[in-house]
Amino acid sequence: MTDPNFETLLRSPLDDESESNGWGSAVLGLVGGGVAVVGLSFILGLWTTPTGATSTSPATDTLSSATNESVEAANRYPDGFTDVGGSVAMKPVAVVTGDTGFIVSFATAAGRGTDPATTPDPLGGRWQIESVDGSVASTTQLIYDRRHTGVIGAEFSGYPSEGDVIRMTERWDPGERAASLEVPFTGTPFSTTGAPELDFGNGVTLRLNRLELGRHLGQIAWSLSGASRQGGVAAFDVEIVNNEGESVGAYRSMPIPREPATAGDVGLFWDRGFNVHPDEGSVVRITATVMLVSPQSVDVVFELDSVPSGN
Amino acid sequence: MDNSKMITGAIVGIVLASLGLMAFTPDQSPGRGESTESTELTSDSTTMPKLPWIAPGEVQFEATVLVPTEIAAENGKVLLDYELATLAPSEGTSSSLDDESTVDALPERWSLSTVSGDNTVETTGPEATSVRFDVRTGLQREHIGDIRLIGWRVAVPTRERITLDLTEGKSEEFAGGTSITVATILEQSDSTIVLLDVDQPHDPWNRIEIDAVDTGWRRAGRLDGGAQFVWDGSGAPPVLVLEQSSPTWVPIEGNLAVFQGGEE
């Protein structure tokens, strides 16, 4: 039983409008059905990238913007690459299994509309392998190849299993700092006394534990303090200057690694011709350029099953 | 509320949304570099925005872009010249200072098909910047159906160390088969020079470079089939720990159109 007066009281202005034009319920159904299909598709995991990598970037507020962002993200980077933030994307390109572990090689690509030469190359990151049984393991080491920009090998112990995924939890952005200092030069062979420090600001210092210079060669042992746990990548230019302020000669550290560290020991090589014997100099000017690691949290999952194996 | 209209609307919504998703869902077909991949770069401009740093006619595999520069057919040969570029970022790292930096993936296997159905496969090495196909005499460029990149190699960084007893004749081997032998030890008044024989397998894709872990050992130059390390001053250690950190080049199968030909 329903009292018609009650129906009149409970009726809203929208009810009247819907009934007057007759299409309100159809529109509601249309929208509801569309939302249901799209939502179900996301739940079922239909929306994945071609490599199966899934980015867990924050959800957007509306359906239309989520769709547009997904399409834009898919085209922002080359085929198969997944956005890891920092204007770069990564892709696991191959797995090589050894006697005690395996290496997943990641390639890195700059985003659309950016110049790779002016896009910061991550100094590394943090990856972990997650198995279907719930076990999680971190990398045993990261392996770099200084000739191949953007290529990083993430090594894990054991062997990969079906269904394993790699989760990237940190991206290590580079932050360039440079500082110089001068010490008196007493001729070759030369070695510093004490442990002079270069100040990069914000509490970050690089200590020269040892600086040795020969006629054409030299060596620097250094250590960082005040930096992140990963440290940075250091390169050195060493110049010998005479009393008139003229450069007598210079050395440069070689090779320059890609792997960040908190301490290192690097050789110095004659960088340009010595016009006179280096003993003509009176001052050693040391310039250190350090790419400090700035860890950034990310959460990106890469499926491992489809990655080619190079055993 | 009119339930029948709402149900009709819901059905229409489901159909439209499904069609929309089908249109925008990325290709999930198995395998990499399916045959449609490169043709999208050149012909499917209506659905995929062009990537400014991958121009039409260029082919992307991994973070490498292959740029065809010339194709010629004469005297029973088809020659394709190309250049390689990288999409890998390089600012802020040492590699931007290193002239020796190279791409992360290199082409290796190619196929050429003619419009009459002949098919030729060729292989190139890591240093190549062109591929040459042997074809039937008289074949012209317009007889080429297509040229495809069907295989490439990707760099996987590896690291391995061996400890070498500094005794002449002593030998150690890396996992990849490269053997290092102490050929000569020269004791100088102010240094020690060690000459090593480096015997590498005949595989252009696996040429390793070695360096001393202890930076007190200075690599003094590259010798043909060998290496030389110098310890300045006295007190050279009795062992030399060597590390190879060259990449392993892993072969990848693909199928990317590099050149689409014309009619015979």
Image (spheres, helix red, strand yellow):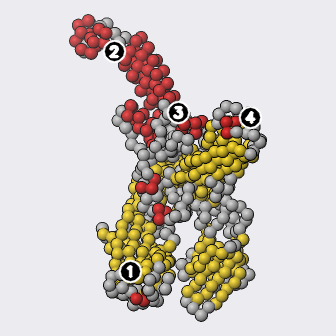
Q: Picture quarter containing residue A57?
A: top left
Q: Nearer the viewer, mark 3 or mark 1?
A: 1
Q: Which mark is residue B117?
A: 4
Which of the chains bears the disc numbered 2?
A
Report the residue marked by disc 2: A24
> How far across and how far down the image is residue B29, in percent?
59, 36
Report the residue marked by disc 1: A247
Q: Nearer the viewer, mark 1 or mark 2?
A: 1
Q: Marks 4 and 2, how far apart in space?
A: 60 Å
In depth, the one of A183 and A51 nearer the eye is A183
Q: Marks 3 and 2, how far apart in space?
A: 39 Å
Q: Marks 4 and 1, how far apart in space?
A: 68 Å
Q: Are marks 1 and 2 in contact (CB under 8 Å)?
A: no
The answer as to whether the residues below labels 1 and 2 share one chain is yes
Q: Residue at x 68, y 66 (%)?
A: B175
Q: Marks 1 and 2, how far apart in space?
A: 83 Å
